Amino acid sequence: MGAPKTPEPKTTKAEDYRVEVSSFRSSGQFYARIRIERLTDKKVIYPFEGAETLGPYESSDKAREAGQVRARELVDADIKSPE
C-alpha cells in the first residue's frame, strides 16, 4: 500500500488566491516581484525555483502593471490545471 493521495485543491475562482505584486529597483531599472498563494491548501504557487524575473521596466508603475498581468495569467493557469 502506498502513501495516501493528497486530494486535488478545489480552486475554481480567482478569489481562492492571495496575490501580492510589488516592484523593486536594481541598477537604475525596475522589476516586478510576485507572490501567489492558493488559499484552499495554503500552497505558494509563485515564485518557484527557476521562476522568471519580470523586467526591466522604465518605472515602478510599469513593473507593477506587468506583474499584475503575469499574476492573472498564473492564477488562470492554476485554476485550469492545479499542480
Image (spheres, rainbow, N blue to C red):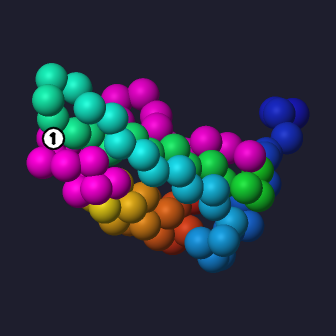
* Quadrant (top left, top right, bottom left, bottom right) of the N terminus: top right
The percent position of residue 63, horizontal first and vertical second, equals 26, 51
The percent position of residue 12, horizontal first and vertical second, equals 65, 75
In the picture provided, is 35 more to the left or to the right than 62? right
Q: Is residue 80 above or below residue 58?
A: below
Along the line of sight, the residue nearer the viewer: 58 or 53: 58
Q: Secondary structure beneath disc 1?
A: strand
The percent position of residue 32, horizontal first and vertical second, equals 32, 44
- Residue at mark 1: 56
Could one spot residue 36 in this view of the protein? yes
Could one spot residue 8 in this view of the protein? no
| Residue ID at (15%, 23%) | 27
| Residue ID at (34%, 29%) | 50
* Number of residues whose C-alpha sits closer than 10 Å to that of mark 1, classed few (under 14), some (14–19) or many (20 or more): some
Give residue 62's quadrant in the image.
bottom left
Give residue 14's quadrant in the image.
bottom right
Question: Across the whole image, how many numbered discs are drawn on residues?
Answer: 1
In the picture provided, is 68 more to the left or to the right than 9? left
Instruction: Read off the magenta span.
Output: 42-64
Residue 62 covered by magenta stretch: yes
The percent position of residue 48, horizontal first and vertical second, equals 46, 34
Amino acid type of the residue tagged 1 in the rendering: Pro
In the picture provided, is 15 more to the left or to the right than 71? right
Along the line of sight, the residue nearer the viewer: 56 or 51: 56
Residue 20 covered by magenta stretch: no
| Residue ID at (42%, 46%) | 22
Residue farthest to the top? Answer: 27
Residue farthest to the bottom? Answer: 13
